[in-house]
Amino acid sequence: MTEQLRLAVIGAGAMGRDHIRYIQDDADARLVAIADPMPATEQVAKDAGVPWFADYQEMLECTALDGVVIASPNHLHVPMARETIKHGIPTLVEKPISDDLDDARAFAAEARVSGVPVLVGQHRRHNPKVRRAKEIIESGALGKIVTVAILYNLYKPDTYYDIPWRRQKGAGPILVNMVHDVDLMRYLIGEPVEIQGMSANAARGFEVEDSAVATVRFANGTLGTITLSDSAASPWNWESTARENPFFAPYDTDAYYIMGTKASLSLPRLHLFSHAGGVSDWTKPFVCEVQGVREGLPHRLQLKHFERVIRGEEAPLVTPEDAIKTLEVLNAVKRAADGGELVRL
Ligand SMILES: NC(=O)c1ccc[n+]([C@@H]2O[C@H](COP(=O)([O-])OP(=O)(O)OC[C@H]3O[C@@H](n4cnc5c(N)ncnc54)[C@H](O)[C@@H]3O)[C@@H](O)[C@H]2O)c1
């Protein structure tokens, strides 16, 4: 058996506690420290049986670590990751890589020069269903992809917004949630070149938006839409449909629709629709083939990947450079929504 990797978590909030659990459950890793200035998180460390640090820098100074997971508020990701790479520690940093594009670009260059691997926590890419969808698309089974429609509409409890940073600039569902949809959209369809958008805060009235829509033109000619709201009581979102996290009650429907000239695919159920006889003909009935995949929880698969990255066996699946491209699209959505213009990337 290989030696267990010594991992620490910076930021023991909602997501950080999930990471803590995944590490504790993993046979190849060992949680060795937690850093979070919030006094209540001392108990999280006590429960986990590891030292607690109010100051993450102190933790980095005095703990032997093979890897660090950063799950702090978005604006702290880059400053913290700068410190972890300064210490030469491979880092899994939560999405979005930053709330500041220029800073993210500067950091990506620093990380590249340092040679210390940095993996960005776009966990959905590790979902076996997403991997299968990519294979189906690349096989040409859909023909030319003409349109894509992505839905992310759910109702976050009002208490979610009791935490101030979530209401303020630098947070909001475009950065916090659409980041996943844009990342998958880029992974599955290609790079966007033009964006139009609108956003609204009419449901909650906070500084950040609660709803947004974006229309996208891709370099390959595909057109797409993303419809997002965290104030809509609807099952048409990845969390309710993908069964990635038992916290969300599952509902058997889809959230992504990818339409091609030969066939169309919906996710996460992986329903592949084509006309009977295999030739597109609107007089023919549809056949729906359900594509099977092995199950696997993406956050846990992401941790396994991070371990292989630490061991030098794999390169990070989502690099800072890759995450920056996603951030550029999100910034374009925001600019388009704020200014009402068409944004070219
Ligand atoms: N990949 C996913 O599925 C997923 C899901 C939810 C959130 N996230 C991401 O995880 C991050 C955290 O989100 P959350 O919902 O857990 O937020 P949260 O507010 O619940 O937790 C953030 C934690 O960071 C701590 N923190 C603040 N300053 C710190 C510092 N200087 N040093 C160490 N810790 C510090 C806070 O005290 C808090 O406990 C965000 O970037 C979010 O986008 C990812």
Image (cartoon, rainbow, N blue to C red):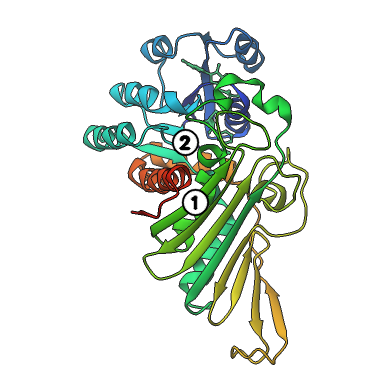
Q: Is residue 22 left or right of residue 331?
A: right
Q: What's the residue type where badge 1 is placed? A: Gly
The residue at 62%/91% (across/down) is 281
Q: Is residue 267 above or below residue 284?
A: above
The residue at 52%/43% (across/down) is 302
Q: Which residue is mark 2?
A: 2
In the rendered image, residue 12, in percent from the top left (x then y), is placed at 57, 21
**Can residue 256 be seen?**
yes
How many marks are shown on the rendered structure?
2
Residue 177 tag number: none
Q: Is residue 39 above or below residue 137?
A: above
In the rendered image, residue 328, in percent from the top left (x then y), is placed at 38, 46
Q: Which residue is mark 1?
A: 197
Q: Is residue 56 above or below residue 291?
A: above
The residue at 65%/37% (across/down) is 202
The quarter of the image holding the C terminus is: bottom left
Q: Residue furthest left?
A: 113
In primary-sequence order, the first of circles 1 and 2 is 2
Q: Nearer the viewer, mark 1 or mark 2?
A: 1
Q: Say whether marks 1 and 2 touch (CB < 8 Å).
A: no
Q: Is residue 107 left or right of residue 121?
A: left
**Can residue 125 be seen?**
no
Of 19 and 263, the residue lying toward us:
263
In the rendered image, residue 168, in percent from the top left (x then y), is placed at 53, 25
* Residue 278, quarter of picture: bottom right
Q: What's the residue type where badge 2 is placed? A: Thr
Q: Secondary structure at mark 2?
A: loop
In the rendered image, residue 218, in percent from the top left (x then y), is placed at 41, 64
